[in-house]
Image: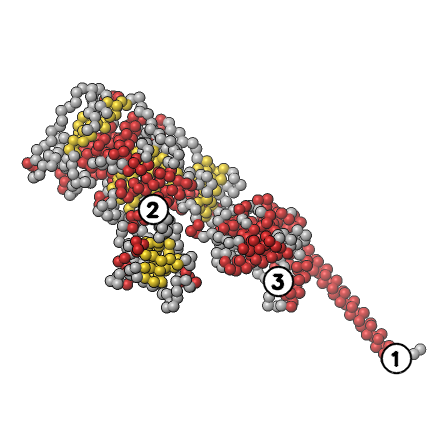
């Protein structure tokens, strides 16, 4: 038997190797079984999947017009639930190509991806790869934190496997595409589509789908609003992966890369109804509390989108037209513009980053300024030159004598408006310091068709249409004339338009009422008096009725008697009303005498479309009757005269239709300017004034300021609406050229009012004591009512 050291060594080393191998195998088996047991225990401890199988995401409160146009959204998350069947396939393909190309093949965890990620992480310790599948991202989004730890990663994988065992692939993808955060408060791809492109998923192009698909990786800093170039680079990566996966052709990829994209921003809002959206929010919040912002409630208002847009445009145009006549108040602000920075430099527009742009009043920064020309850069980077008439309003600020804060110079932040006509000329403008409101309602139903609560909601959230309680001025007169009709004063009755002897207490107060033109017409019919808005005539009517009777009658139309004075100043509209209340009051006349409350909310539904509230139909029954049909008809005939030949004659002249009724209103010193009127199917009220009441100007009036806005709006709203001139009720007759109640057709009506309290003859100079008193005319023959002159 031979023996050698080498053989001994080989024998010993082999034994050692075998023993070591057995130890390693045993250790591996122990680790494997420990891991398996641990994984089983962890798997069993994974949370219940009810949050996925019964998916109820937080969805915002959304407000719509009657036709379904969205006007407002409230909630911390912008999210719309979209079934997978309604998500375009090319968007699904884009997401899978860039996020999880083997999604349809794996069981929740991509084994190849995990191995690749492990090797990458070992090789590059500074840059980790997660290898998360879409299912893992769903698990993390719904149940786990985003902390990068091995325990969290293991839980994520196990939970992904559990999810795929209980849900189908389409269910998982649907959850992912509705839940994922995509920047700009948008959760889910439908919300992102509307946030970034202003359109729904079904309208997206391939280029837009690819840009959205690139958002999940870095939604905060690589979205097209925050950084368009980063978003575009990511879009190209998505397109390339779609081509590599055979989802699109090379030609389609290139066409998508070349497609110009319009990124949605706040100025792209197509319909402005912010005050209505806020009113609806308050109504819903009062009923549902904080849950209103997460249940996905949908509120349908009574607004008509086209009418709302016409109202918004008409009011803004009227306010801007008024402001053009006002002195220029100086630049909005002053920025430090470095020397050498030209108007086309990219950094110029950045100086305007903190200023809000506007549809009509574009924010701009001045790089050159002189009395002959101003060169300015818009927030979009566009450079414009302002010359000629465009400098007219701001000329004082361009003068060498202009004070520092009031002068336009390099670095001045100003507002520009562009002529929408053929010239396209730019002009220097300013934010108006006057406010306005417009309300339009259907008189038969009370449905609010248009509602503009102010010039700009972002700058002033106060709702002037519903909460601005102002003096109505002469717009209150038709309701006082309505009261007079019930006391025997008919349209042909003569009223004395002459100076008035005032009671001692009123005279002592210093109140000295006059007509707006300062003159007096003497005997004038009731019809002529309203058409010319004669103050002294209305005062005599209230004097005849008594202020208490007049106030009580105003209550029939919805006015609060407590907000109306208990003296003769009531005749001139020194009480208080709001545009919405005044529209409701004129609606009583327009619908033939029924009191109908304004209605703004038509329907409220939950996220699944179940109706939670539906406004009942309006019923014009005896309970709603406020005044008689004959009173409404005759009062309306007087208002029709106002728009035909009186202070609002421009209405019928410009709109070229005879079925218009209305009244101008201007308070003392032109603090408030009104026009209230209607066509039988639509009432509209316009108001203009300052938040801190002060004169609009010595020559301003409701006819000059608010009537043009009303005409502009009604011109749009009444397109295609047939002329409607209601027939006279059976108990009204036309005698002597004008209407009279049947009861008084053969006597009993007042033939004259106010001829026993005049202090001086028409046109007679000298002290009141020596002035002759006008005598009442001889009464007409029995059975005949005086016609108009």
Numbered disc 3: secondary structure: loop
Task: Give the number of the disc on residue 317.
Answer: 2
- Please state which of residues 163 and 133 is positioned toward the viewer in this rendering: 133
Residue wearing tag 1: 4
Give the side of residue 135 with respect to residue 633, left or right.
Answer: right
Whichever of callouts 2 and 3 sits on the residue coming sooner in the sequence is 3
- Please state which of residues 566 and 640 is positioned toward the viewer in this rendering: 640
Q: Quadrant of residue 391?
A: bottom left
- Please state which of residues 185 and 57 is positioned toward the viewer in this rendering: 185
Whichever of callouts 1 and 2 sits on the residue coming sooner in the sequence is 1
Residue for point 51% across, 38% down: 610
Q: Is residue 95 above or below residue 518?
A: below
Numbered disc 2: secondary structure: helix
Residue 430 spot, x, y in % from top left:
32, 54
Label tally: 3
Is residue 83 something one can see in this rendering?
no
Quadrant location, the C terminus: top left
Q: Quadrant of residue 13?
A: bottom right
Give the side of residue 146 with respect to residue 651, left or right.
Answer: right
Task: Give the number of the disc on residue 738.
Answer: none
Binning the other alpha carbons within 10 Å of mark 1 as few (below 14), some (14 to 19) or many (20 upward) gives few
Is residue 608 something one can see in this rendering?
yes
Binning the other alpha carbons within 10 Å of mark 3 as few (below 14), some (14 to 19) or many (20 upward) gives some
Residue for point 44% across, 35% down: 615
Whichever of callouts 1 and 3 sits on the residue coming sooner in the sequence is 1
Give the side of residue 582 with respect to residue 754, left or right.
Answer: right
**CA separation in Å, label 2 and label 3:** 57 Å
Residue wearing tag 3: 129
Q: Is residue 17 above or below residue 547?
A: below
Q: Residue furthest left?
A: 770
**CA separation in Å, label 1 and label 2:** 112 Å
């Amino acid at each position: 038997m031979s023996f050698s050291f080498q053989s001994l060594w080989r024998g010993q080393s082999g034994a050692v190797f075998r023993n070591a191998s057995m130890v390693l195998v045993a250790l591996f088996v122990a680790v494997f079984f420990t891991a398996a047991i641990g994984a089983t225990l962890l798997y069993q401890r994974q949370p219940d999947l009810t949050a996925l199988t019964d998916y109820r995401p937080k969805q915002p409160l959304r407000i719509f017009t009657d036709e379904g146009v969205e006007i407002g959204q409230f909630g911390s998350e912008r999210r719309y639930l979209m079934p997978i069947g309604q998500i375009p396939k090319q968007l699904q393909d884009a997401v899978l190509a860039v996020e999880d190309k083997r999604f349809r093949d794996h069981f929740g965890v991509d084994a190849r991806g995990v191995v690749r990620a492990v090797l990458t992480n070992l090789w590059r310790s500074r840059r980790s790869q997660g290898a998360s599948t879409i299912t893992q991202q769903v698990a993390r989004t719904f149940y786990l934190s985003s902390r990068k730890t091995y325990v969290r990663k293991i839980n994520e994988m196990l939970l992904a496997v559990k999810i795929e065992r209980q849900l189908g692939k389409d269910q998982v993808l649907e959850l992912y595409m509705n839940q994922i955060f995509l920047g700009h408060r948008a959760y889910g791809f439908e919300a992102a589509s509307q946030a970034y492109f202003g359109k729904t998923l079904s309208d997206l192009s391939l280029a837009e789908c690819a840009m959205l698909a690139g958002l999940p990786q870095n939604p905060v800093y690589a979205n097209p609003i925050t950084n368009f170039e980063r978003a575009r680079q990511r879009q190209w990566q998505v397109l390339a992966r779609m081509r590599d996966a055979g989802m699109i052709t090379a030609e389609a990829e290139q066409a998508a890369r070349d497609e110009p994209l319009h990124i949605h921003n706040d100025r792209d809002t197509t319909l402005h109804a912010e005050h209505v959206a806020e009113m609806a929010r308050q109504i819903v919040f009062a009923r549902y509390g904080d849950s209103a912002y997460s249940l996905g409630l949908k509120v349908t208002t009574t607004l008509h989108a086209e009418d709302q847009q016409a109202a918004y445009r008409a009011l803004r145009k009227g306010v801007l037209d008024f402001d053009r006549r006002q002195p220029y108040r100086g630049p909005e602000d002053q920025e430090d513009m470095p020397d050498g920075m030209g108007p086309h430099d990219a950094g110029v527009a950045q100086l305007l980053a903190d200023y809000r742009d506007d549809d009509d009043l574009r924010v701009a920064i001045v790089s050159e300024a002189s009395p002959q020309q101003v060169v300015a850069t818009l927030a979009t980077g566009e450079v414009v030159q302002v010359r000629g008439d465009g400098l007219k309003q701001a000329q004082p600020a361009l003068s060498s004598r202009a004070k520092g804060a009031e002068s336009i110079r390099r670095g001045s932040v100003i507002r520009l408006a562009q002529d929408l006509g053929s010239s396209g000329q730019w002009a220097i403008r300013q934010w108006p310091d006057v406010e306005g409101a417009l309300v339009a309602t259907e008189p038969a139903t009370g449905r609010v068709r248009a509602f503009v609560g102010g010039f700009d909601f972002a700058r002033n959230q106060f709702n002037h249409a519903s909460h601005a309680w102002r003096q109505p001025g002469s717009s209150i007169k038709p309701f006082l004339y309505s009261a007079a009709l019930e006391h025997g004063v008919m349209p042909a009755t003569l009223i004395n338009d002459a100076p008035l002897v005032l009671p001692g207490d009123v005279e002592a107060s210093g109140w000295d009422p006059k007509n707006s033109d300062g003159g007096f017409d003497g005997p004038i019919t009731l019809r002529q008096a309203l058409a010319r808005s004669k103050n002294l005539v209305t005062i005599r009517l209230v004097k005849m009725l008594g202020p208490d009777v007049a106030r009580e009658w105003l209550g029939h139309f919805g006015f609060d008697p407590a907000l109306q004075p208990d003296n003769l100043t009531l005749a001139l509209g020194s009480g208080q009303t709001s545009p919405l209340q005044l529209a409701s009051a004129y609606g009583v006349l327009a619908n033939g005498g029924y009191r109908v409350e304004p209605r703004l909310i038509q329907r409220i539904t939950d996220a699944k479309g179940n109706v939670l509230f539906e406004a009942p139909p309006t019923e014009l029954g005896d309970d709603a009757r406020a005044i008689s049909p004959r009173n409404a008809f005759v009062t309306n005939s007087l208002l029709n005269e106002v728009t035909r030949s009186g202070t609002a004659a421009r209405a019928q002249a410009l709109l070229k239709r005879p079925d218009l009724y209305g009244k101008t209103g201007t308070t003392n010193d032109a603090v408030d300017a009104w026009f209230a009127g209607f066509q039988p199917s639509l009432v509209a009220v316009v108001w203009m004034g300052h938040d801190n009441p002060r004169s609009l100007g010595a020559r301003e009036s409701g006819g000059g300021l608010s009537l043009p806005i009303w005409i502009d709006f009604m011109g749009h709203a009444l397109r295609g609406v047939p002329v409607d001139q209601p027939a006279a009720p059976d108990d009204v007759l036309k005698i002597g050229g004008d209407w009279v109640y049947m009861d008084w057709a053969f006597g009993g009506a007042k033939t004259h009012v106010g001829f026993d309290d005049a202090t001086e003859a028409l046109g007679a100079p000298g002290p009141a004591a020596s002035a002759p008193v006008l005598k009442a005319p001889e009464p007409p023959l029995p059975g005949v009512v005086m016609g108009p002159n």
